[in-house]
Image (cartoon, rainbow, N blue to C red):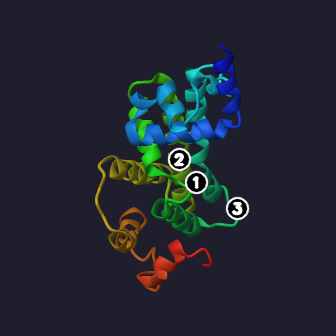
Amino acid sequence: MGRVLGNAKKNSHLTHGDWIRAARGILISDGVGGLSLRRIAAVLEATTGAFYWQFANLEALLADLREDWRRRNSAAFDRVFGDADLDGFGRYLGYVRILLREDEYDPKYDSAMRDWAHSCEKSHAVVTEVDARRVAQLEGMFTELGFNSRSARVRAMMTYFHQSGYYQMNIDETQEERLANIPYYAEIMVGPGFFPPELQGERLRRVIFDDAE
């Protein structure tokens, strides 16, 4: 018993965030079936005893992992759609930047959560709530762009369902292809001329990927 406690104390430098990061990585790579206490501890090279310095049990960690996804994969969208200084075009462009850059939003984390939601009611509830919020954000954007309530709602759902399906199907496109398609998606969802001719090609690349723009 003394050795177990001693090893747990040795690993007590591990933070709550360390355990969540390890669990997140396993969820993304192997799915929820890989989320055992022993597996997470092994990734951190820690004892299972060290786990209990941070969590009461595995379910407590899973609950915090769900909240980590809710917060981490929604923060960028919340920032763009909550920015009072952006107009409809600015919000659309900001949304596209989030999807293409993938530095604040991880589509693989989204896909892993959706898979988990199929077998867990608690995860399903969180995913449903986040989906509803994101669709509502897009609906507000389309409303701001001049569409009536029903049209804005349908366009929001089409935009969101398309993007979710895109990731679930593991579509294989190069970054160049994704960039080239942006004005065409916008034409379908908003209308001709939404993206000005000068905002294409290399100029669009700089706007999407250059923080100085």
Q: Quadrant of the N terminus?
A: top right
Q: Is residue 204 left or right of residue 91?
A: left
Question: Residue sitting at 43 percent across and 48 percent down?
Answer: 108
Q: Can you tell which mark lies on residue 84?
A: 3
Which of the marked residues, 2 or 1, is nearer the chain's N terminus?
A: 1
Q: Quadrant of the C terminus?
A: bottom right
Q: Do tag 2 and tag 1 residues touch (Cβ < 8 Å)?
A: yes
Q: Disc 3 and disc 1: Cα gap in Å?
A: 13 Å
Which of 106 and 163 lies nearest the eye of the viewer? Answer: 106
Answer few, some or many: residues within 10 Å of disc 3's Cα (few below 14, many 20 plus, some between 14 and 19): few
Say what secondary structure mark 2 lies in.
helix
* Quarter-of-image position of residue 195: bottom left
Q: Can you tell which mark lies on residue 197?
A: none
Three-letter code, disc 2: Arg
Residue 131 at what x, y percent from top left?
49, 41
- Location of residue 5 with respect to 182 vertically, above or below: above
Question: Residue sitting at 38 percent across and 37 percent down?
Answer: 30
Q: Is residue 14 left or right of residue 183?
A: right
Q: Is residue 95 left or right of residue 168?
A: right
Answer few, some or many: residues within 10 Å of disc 2's Cα (few below 14, many 20 plus, some between 14 and 19): some
Q: Which residue is mark 1?
A: 77
Three-letter code, disc 3: Ala
- Location of residue 46 with respect to 110 vertically, above or below: above
